[in-house]
Image (tube, rainbow, N blue to C red):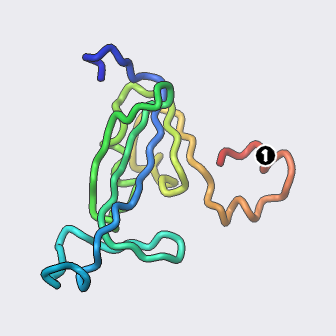
Amino acid sequence: MAKKGLLLKRGSIVDATIIAAPSSTKNESGERDPEMHQTKKGNQWHVGMKAHIGVDTDSGLVHTVTTTAANEADVEQVRDLLHGKEDAVWADSGYREVQSRVKRDVQWHIAGRPSDMAKMREGRAKARTPM
């Protein structure tokens, strides 16, 4: 992207999405694909892989994509999703442990878990908490 004149420097947003695949009992061969794994999101089970994505906060352009088995923790991919020039990173609650795993001099903006947010009192403190 830098070769095209697009600078990536201010910040990144990281997230992951599930890429669904047919379950092993519903595919043509009836055999299990060793690369496909299951994961639970909320109360729903999914079979497939995950796409982990890093997006530039200023331009909205995707700068990094990695894929893993669906059961891989989102936080494990952060190191590969950052381009190294950002001063801030935004992520959802799946990345809560990132600060202890990735040693970078950036400001982390990690959303709280919905269950923790529900326990907070209504008012100014809840309104100031990043979601």
Please name the amino acid that badge 1 sits on. Answer: Ala
Work out whether 120 lies above or below 90. Answer: below
Identify whether 92 is placed above or below 87: below
Residue found at the far top of this picture: 5
Residue 87 in sight in this render = no
Residue 79 visible in the displayed image: yes
Q: Secondary structure at mark 1?
A: helix
104 and 41: which is toward the camera? 41
Residue for point 67% across, 66% down? 115
In the rendering, at what x and y percent does residue 129 appear? 71, 46
**Quick one: which residue is furthest to the front in this view?**
28
The image quarter in which residue 128 lies:
top right
Q: Residues within 10 Å of mark 1 (few under 14, many from 20)?
A: few
Residue at (33% x, 73% y) in the render: 47
Q: Horizontally, is 96 left or right of 116 in the view?
A: left
Q: State the image quarter where residue 4 is shown.
A: top left
Nearer to us in this view, 111 or 108 = 111
**Residue at x-position 43% and y-position 76%:** 45
Q: Quadrant of the N terminus?
A: top left
**Residue 106 % position (x, y):** 48, 32
Q: Mark 1 highlights which residue? A: 127
Q: Is residue 108 above or below residue 23?
A: above
Between 45 and 85, the one lying in front of the other is: 45
- Give the residue drawn at x 48%, y 69%: 41
**Residue 29 percent across, percent down from the top left:** 13, 81
User: Vertical placement of 22 versus 57: above or below?
Assistant: below
